[in-house]
Amino acid sequence: MPADIAHAVFRMKPFDVLVAEAEDADVSGWGFDWLAGRATEERPPWGYAELLAQRLAAVQSALDLDTGGGEVLAQAPRFPPLMCATEAWPPNARLARERLAARGVHMVETSADSPLPFADASFELVTARHPVRPDWQQIHRVLRPGGCYFAQHVGPASAFELIEYFLGPLPRERRQRDPQAEAADARAAGLTITDLRTARCRMVFHDVGAVVWILRKCVWWVPDFSVQKYRRQLLALDGQMRKGTPFIAQASRHLVEARR
């Protein structure tokens, strides 16, 4: 179904139907196919998945941190002889294991804030797409001398138009995930920054169900979110969208490459 037709169909559904669909939908893993026809997000110009595939094909050992359900890693056509991945959220770790095990990836379920369960200097390449919180000391430790960290991070104030719609102004939180601060932390851990690029990418939500679904999936955006608690705000959004005005936010991303 063309996107413009899908938008019209979704807008014609009653508010409670859209919300019920979003509450019943699966939010496990790190795929966003459910949003097709309901929301869009512009991609950064550098094409992370393709760059990742090129780097994986050129090394003998690699580690992918916070791999989610393995969706992005699985796009690479070739893995090095030693390919490991970590994930801390059990439902995602299970999906990643199912998706990647047949290709020889060693999937390790980790816990937040614990040291990486790998020996020093284990990997030529460490990668991550949207890591929860990069631990630069651990990244430096598991990289071999001359090894590379290559990742796409979520930047400052990402999707804050939507987050602050529900929570109000968050001036302190807006300053978190600053790419220059992260680069300084990486250098302090002994890494050399070789590339740092930033991008702001347009996010468009066409129906209230898309908003409910994304807030169920990205639970850290509005930690106390529930339809019951925020019903008034959701109804206001629904009314806006039915008049043909989508909700627009800005995703923030940065590409970082560093060497030990």
Image (cartoon, helix red, strand yellow):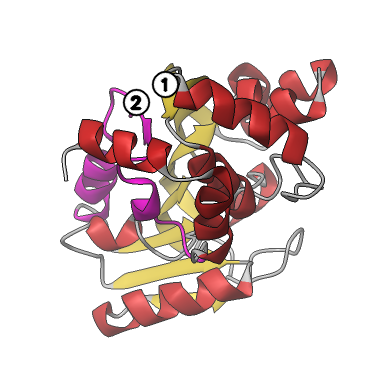
Magenta residues, as a range?
28-57
Please identify the quarter of the rendering in which residue 171 is found: top right
Image position of 194 with respect to 37: above or below: above
The image position of residue 147, as x and y in percent, is: 42, 47
User: Is 126 or 47 nearer to us in this picture?
Assistant: 47
Please identify the quarter of the rendering in which residue 168 is found: top right
Residue 44 tag number: 2
229 sits left or right of 82 in the view: right
The image position of residue 81, as x and y in percent, is: 26, 72
Residue type at the position of mark 1: Cys
Image position of 248 with respect to 192: above or below: above
User: Is 232 or 127 nearer to us in this picture?
Assistant: 232
Residue at x 43% of width, y 72% of height: 96
Q: Contact, CB < 8 Å: mark 2 with mark 1?
A: yes
Helix or strand or loop: what does disc 2 sit on? Answer: loop
User: Is residue 34 on the magenta stretch?
Assistant: yes
User: Is 247 or 102 nearer to us in this picture?
Assistant: 247
141 sits left or right of 45 in the view: right
Front of the two marks 2 and 1: 1
The image position of residue 194, as x and y in percent, is: 42, 24
Question: Does residue 188 appear in this view?
Answer: no
Label 1 crowd bin: few (<14), some (14–19), many (20+), radius 10 Å? some
User: Is residue 187 on the magenta stretch?
Assistant: no
Q: State how far apart marks 2 and 1 are (Cα).
A: 7 Å
Residue at x 55% of width, y 46% of height: 214
Residue at x 49% of width, y 20% of height: 248
**Dot 1 corresponds to which residue?**
201
The image position of residue 176, as x and y in percent, is: 73, 25
Residue at x 65% of width, y 53% of height: 138
192 sits left or right of 39 in the view: right
